[in-house]
């Protein structure tokens, strides 16, 4: 189905450590900001899709997360669909909202992503990530990571107990990329340094300090070759969008409408190491549906849960050839002012990664970029944008992957 939906309004909280703010308050802040931006009242909403991954584990709120959040601001009666899809929860919620609007079922729909990961007991926070793999084979996975680290001489890697196992998964992929293509740890650090500059310009980002490559490399090692700034932090936050049909957007006088022209969602599958995976499949279909190619993009928000993840996403999304991600970061092309700026928000590395909110936070950034509202981090003349958001891991691929293309 060809997508034909309009982002009528966006809103989000600052991402960070909000120990005294609950899930309801975070979600309400983002929703109310999006409604204000769209110029509509809550009674205009006909349905809501609410992405969240870990509230059950961290806060104890299960089953009716979206209803609880929306009822706290007086929104009831409408159908609320709770969406849980690991780190792709919010982008999946947006995908479903846009699909329902494009199909003509609704004219005005809310898509919300919200998460609280900070907790006095850090084991609860990390449990949110350890459950994003096949738990029946988790011990086999941990042993495989340890053996990989040992074989590659990575003393500080191998699934430590005081961090997300995903950092060990990313570390193993990074070491393999270095061995195969000659990618350097300085190039991975360059991703973080770039994103720290972008994040310093974003008032809603979790971190605002600007780091050099030397700063990144001097930080404590988490899982070799990943130092702490090369790993996305946990965080709390929410992001929301009001999705409208084109007809409704025109009737309501939405200025500078941003269209969702493609949103492709797939799950991983068993395939060979050198065969295209979920990112390549989603990107190929999204480009085909939008009638464009990678060269037509002006700005990208990608899932940099680790610095190597962004560098490898360059290759999978077609921004450069396989093995050339390191050279692309060295060129400066993905920094503000470059040919194709990536993660102008600061990305997950610096803006933060409240898992269930991340995918829609990307859409907030890209919508504001296409509308020229990003101030010092504005990409001049941006008209076409892509969001890449994945979640979970099974085998050698993501469990869920979503690629969305927006146009002004």
Image (tube, rainbow, N blue to C red):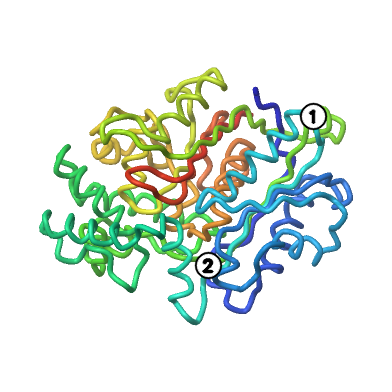
Q: Secondary structure at mark 2?
A: loop
Residue 17 lies, in percent from the top left, at: 53, 72
* Label 2 to label 1: alpha-carbon separation: 37 Å
Q: Quadrant of the N terminus?
A: top right
Q: Is residue 386 visible?
A: yes
Q: Residue at x 40, y 50 (%)?
A: 393
The extreme bottom residue here reads 120
Against 288, is 88 above or below?
below
Of all residues, the one furthest to the top in this rendering is 291
Question: Which residue is identified by label 1?
Answer: 104
Point 49% across, 58% down: residue: 353
Q: Where residue 323 sits in the image (x, y, percent)?
A: 23, 34
Camera-side mark, 2 or 1: 1
Helix, strand or loop under label 1: loop
N-terminal of the two: label 2 or label 1?
A: 2
Is 159 on the left-hand or right-hand side of 207? left
Q: Nearer the viewer, residue 152 or 181?
A: 152
Q: Position of residue 248 (x, y in %)?
A: 83, 32
Quadrant of the drawing holding the C terminus: top right
Q: Which residue in the structure is indicated by mark 2?
A: 16
Above or below, 139 relative to 364: below
2 over 22 or under it: above or below: above
Q: Residue at x 45, y 54 (%)?
A: 348
Residue 382 at x, y = what percent?
Answer: 55, 32
The residue at the far front in this view is: 136
Q: Are marks 2 and 1 in contact (CB under 8 Å)?
A: no
């Amino acid at each position: 189905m060809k997508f034909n939906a309009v982002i009528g309004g966006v809103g989000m909280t600052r991402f960070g450590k909000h120990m005294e703010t609950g899930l309801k308050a975070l979600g309400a802040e983002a929703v109310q900001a999006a409604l204000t931006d769209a110029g509509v009242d809550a009674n205009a909403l006909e349905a809501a899709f609410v992405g969240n991954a870990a509230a059950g584990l961290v806060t104890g709120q299960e089953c009716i997360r979206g209803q609880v959040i929306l009822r706290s601001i007086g929104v009831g009666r409408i159908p609320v669909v709770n969406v849980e899809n690991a780190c792709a929860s919010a982008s999946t919620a947006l995908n479903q909202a846009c699909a329902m609007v494009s199909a003509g079922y609704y004219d005005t729909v809310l898509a919300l992503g919200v998460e609280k990961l900070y907790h006095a007991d850090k084991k609860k926070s990390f449990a949110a990530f350890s459950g994003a793999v096949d738990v029946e084979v988790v011990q086999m996975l941990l042993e495989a990571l340890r053996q990989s680290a040992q074989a590659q001489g990575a003393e500080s890697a191998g699934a430590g107990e005081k961090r997300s196992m995903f950092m060990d998964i990313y570390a193993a992929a990074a070491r393999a990329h270095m061995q195969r293509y000659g990618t350097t740890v300085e190039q991975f650090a360059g991703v973080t340094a770039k994103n720290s500059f972008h994040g310093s310009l974003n008032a809603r980002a979790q971190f605002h300090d600007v780091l050099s490559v030397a700063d990144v490399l001097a930080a404590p090692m988490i899982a070799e070759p990943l130092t702490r700034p090369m790993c996305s932090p946990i965080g709390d936050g929410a992001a929301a969008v009001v999705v409208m049909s084109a007809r409704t957007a025109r009737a309501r006088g939405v200025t500078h409408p941003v269209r969702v022209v493609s949103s492709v969602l797939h799950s991983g599958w068993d395939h060979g190491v050198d065969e295209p995976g979920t990112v390549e499949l989603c990107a190929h279909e999204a480009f085909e549906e939008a009638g464009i190619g990678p060269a037509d993009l002006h700005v990208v928000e990608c899932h940099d849960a680790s610095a190597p993840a962004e560098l490898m996403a360059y290759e999978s999304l077609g921004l450069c050839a396989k093995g050339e991600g390191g050279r692309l970061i060295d060129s400066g092309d993905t920094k503000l002012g470059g040919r194709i700026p990536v993660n102008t928000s600061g990305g997950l590395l610096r803006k933060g990664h409240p898992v269930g909110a991340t995918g829609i936070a990307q859409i907030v950034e890209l919508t504001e970029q296409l509308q020229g509202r990003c101030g010092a981090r504005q990409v001049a003349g941006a008209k076409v944008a892509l969001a890449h958001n994945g979640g979970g891991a099974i085998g050698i691929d993501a469990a869920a992957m979503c690629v969305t293309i927006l146009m002004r």
